[in-house]
Amino acid sequence: MSQPSAESAPKPHVTAVLFWSSLIVVSAVYLTIPLISLFADLFRVSASQAAWVGSAFSFAFAGGGLLFGVLSDRYGRKKLMMAGLALLGATTLAIGAVDSLPWLVALRALQGLAASMFPPSVLAYAMEMFPAKKRVTIIGFISTAFLMASIVGQLYSSLIVLTFDWTYVFYILSAVYLASFAAIVFGIPSDKSGSAKGSFFAPFARIGHIFKRKGLPIAYIISATLFTALVGYFSTLGSYLSGPTFGMSHQEILWVRAVGIIGMFISPFDGKLVARFGVKRVLCCGLALAAVGLGLLGIWPNLAFLIALSVVFTTGVAMALPAQISLIGQLAGDIRAIAVSFHMFMLFIGASLGPIVAVYLMDLGGYLFTFLILAGLLALSTIVPLFIRLGEAPTAAHGQAQHSA
């Protein structure tokens, strides 16, 4: 597939549409975190049972991302984004009308499946529609949206339930998804993928090619540990701040988390960093910075110190994520869409494991121990790029992308 030139690059408003749509789609992952206790009281169940409202979405989101990432090769990136937003609008509206926990869990799983159509498609779209010099920058904007969603989703649902019934969290968001569907339909150019030729199952056979590309399989170690640490951090931080040391309310904790958005704004500048220092150096630096911020987080029970290190941690994650996606794209070449889909799958498997790991570690050794172990995972991940060689690319198109990066 020929690479787009600078002249043929999509107009600036396309970046805004992709950023906004990515933000609101991935926000759905974190939407119900502040609502778990509300659902437990409403449906008279335990908090662990109510937590399935989030887990059902996460598992469907992780598995569906792999499935639809493969299918976007067959049907096209823009078509999958449109289908995902349309289904999200419908399922999110239906969630607001449920009156039982089983239906809520089932519809959240369906919502997760619909949402999973978007992230791998938007990343593959960005890689294919933007010229090599702008590719890491647009991936940086999309990565910023993915990271900001972890805070924006929680803030949104918390603020809505302060004024309205919980159902309005989903009614309002449904309208937002449908408006965003229109923005995708009319606001971005169509991609050239999606021939829909040959066997329906043929694209799935290409998943195996991921494990034949040198360096690519071990790169996914970073994908898993990055979001295990990120979501584990959110889970641990919440318990730490609400505990006896700080005694903060749920709303106060959310505002502390919101400050972390400051660090996430480095992602759009990752392209310039990669151009100057190389993708592997930027990735290692981001992982190391995140490890330092997280490892020092619990050593001094001072709120200003904790907030400052939270910003250091999120800055590191925001540096590492777009660099990681760019690295996978370089290693994968002509199978980049499937490779990025598998990255998203591993990312959200890590997100699903994060709370489980955090709770286990807190029970085992407390908050400082948990922060240190999660930081240790990130520190170990910095070794992975050292074993990856960016040699000759599998295809000519891949070679052009690698040379420019």
Image (cartoon, rainbow, N blue to C red):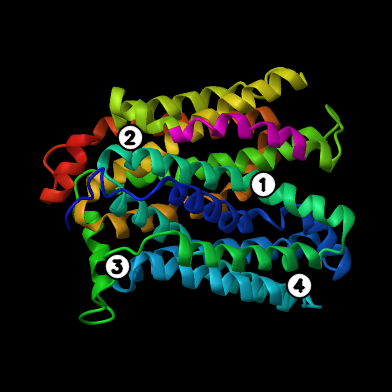
Q: Are marks 1 and 4 in contact (CB under 8 Å)?
A: no
Q: Mark 2 points at which residue?
A: 384
Q: Nearer the viewer, residue 30 or 369?
A: 30
User: Which quadrant of the rendered structure holds the C terminus?
Assistant: top left
Residue 228 left/right relative to 10: right
Name the N-terminal-most of marks 4 and 2.
Answer: 4
Give the number of the disc on residue 152: 1
Residue contact between numbered discs 1 and 2, judged by CB atoms under 8 Å = no
Between the residue at mark 1 and the residue at mark 4, the CA separation in whole angstroms equals 20 Å
Q: What residue type is labelled 2?
A: Val
- Dot 2 or dot 3: first in sequence order is 3
Q: Do the residues labelled 2 and 3 touch (CB within 8 Å)?
A: no
Pointer 1 or 2: first along the chain: 1
**Quadrant of the frame with the N terminus:** bottom left
Residue 126 in view here: yes
Residue 73's label in the rendered image is 3
**Magenta stretch in the rendered image:** 254-268
- The image shows residue 163 at horizontal and vertical percentages of 89, 55
| 315 falls in the magenta region | no
Tell me the CA gap for discs 3 and 4: 33 Å
Question: Which numbered disc flags the more N-terminal residue, 3 or 4?
Answer: 3
User: Quarter of the image holding residue 386?
Assistant: top left
Secondary-structure class at tag 1: helix
Question: Which amino acid type is marked by label 4?
Answer: Gly
Q: In which quarter of the image is residue 314?
A: top right
| Residue placed under numbered mark 4 in the picture | 96
